Image: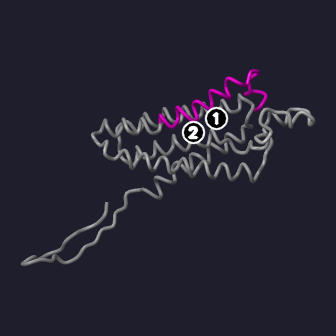
Amino acid sequence: MRGALRTSRTTAPDVTSSVIGFVVMPAMAFGTGALAARHDGRLGEWPIDALIIGEAAVLAADVNQLTKFMVGRERPFVHALPPEQRQSTSQPSDNNLSFFSGHTTLAFSLATASGTVASMRGYREAPVIWVVGMTLATLTGYLRIAADKHYFTDVLTGALVGSGIGFAVPYFFHRPRTDVGIGPASGSGASGLTVSGVF
């Protein structure tokens, strides 16, 4: 996979993946969510949406960084160098932080969290958020391989972890709850039952 996907000039894909991953993806995730909420006349919900998306992205980044330092996998371009040249790279402290791709993890966590939140809210523009987000996240992952910074398995793992956390945080921790209580009506002269709850 490395030979098939990496480019001979790695600087452009490296810079482009950083711009997409750290600038375009957050702008897309938060911006399209705000536009979708506004389009449906529910812009007041956007701050909570943004907080949930941000929570997923931070958790995904934390898991990624912890794993990188625990595993210590050598980056592909470093592995291809003769042993005596490996410590003369531009950032030797970054040489063994290949597994798994942080750019890809962040991109997929943002894309999936923003899509999941939009779908759970029932925003009409949710499909657009999914398509744009996943396209940019996939492009980010490809560019990390093209830049020779990551192996395919680094990017695939980043996509799976980022998507998993991006889905799990909104769905399992912020999904609307239905807690319904039924009891006798109270008050002067009231009779019957009352229904109350959190939806």
The range drawn in magenta is 1-28
Coordinates of residue 90 in the picture (x, y in percent):
78, 32
Label number found at residue 131: none
- Residue appearing at x 79%, y 35% in the figure: 76
Image quadrant containing the C terminus:
bottom left
Coordinates of residue 19 in the picture (x, y in percent):
59, 30
Residue 154 in the figure: left or right of residue 192? right
Give whichever of 69, 76 is nearer the camera: 69
Residue type, mark 1 in image? Gly
* Residue at disc 2, secondary structure: helix
Labelled pair 2, 1 in contact (Cβ < 8 Å): yes
Query: Which secondary structure type mostly characterizes the magenta part of the structure?
Result: helix
Residue 83 in the figure: left or right of residue 116? right
Label number found at residue 141: 1
Image quadrant containing the N terminus:
top right
Q: Residue furthest top?
A: 9
Coordinates of residue 17 in the picture (x, y in percent):
63, 30
Upstream in the sequence, badge 2 or badge 1?
A: 2
Q: Is residue 22 magenta?
A: yes
Residue neighbourhood size for the residue with mark 2, other residues' Cα within 10 Å, grouped as few (<14), some (14–19), many (≥20)? many
Q: Which residue is mark 2?
A: 107
* Residue at disc 1, secondary structure: helix
- Residue appearing at x 46%, y 54% in the figure: 171
Quadrant position of residue 35: top left
Coordinates of residue 78 in the picture (x, y in percent):
82, 35
Residue type, mark 2 in image? Ala
Q: Indicate how the structure is coloured in the image.
A: one colour
- Residue appearing at x 87%, y 32% in the figure: 81
Q: Is residue 75 magenta?
A: no
Give whichever of 87, 13 is nearer the camera: 87
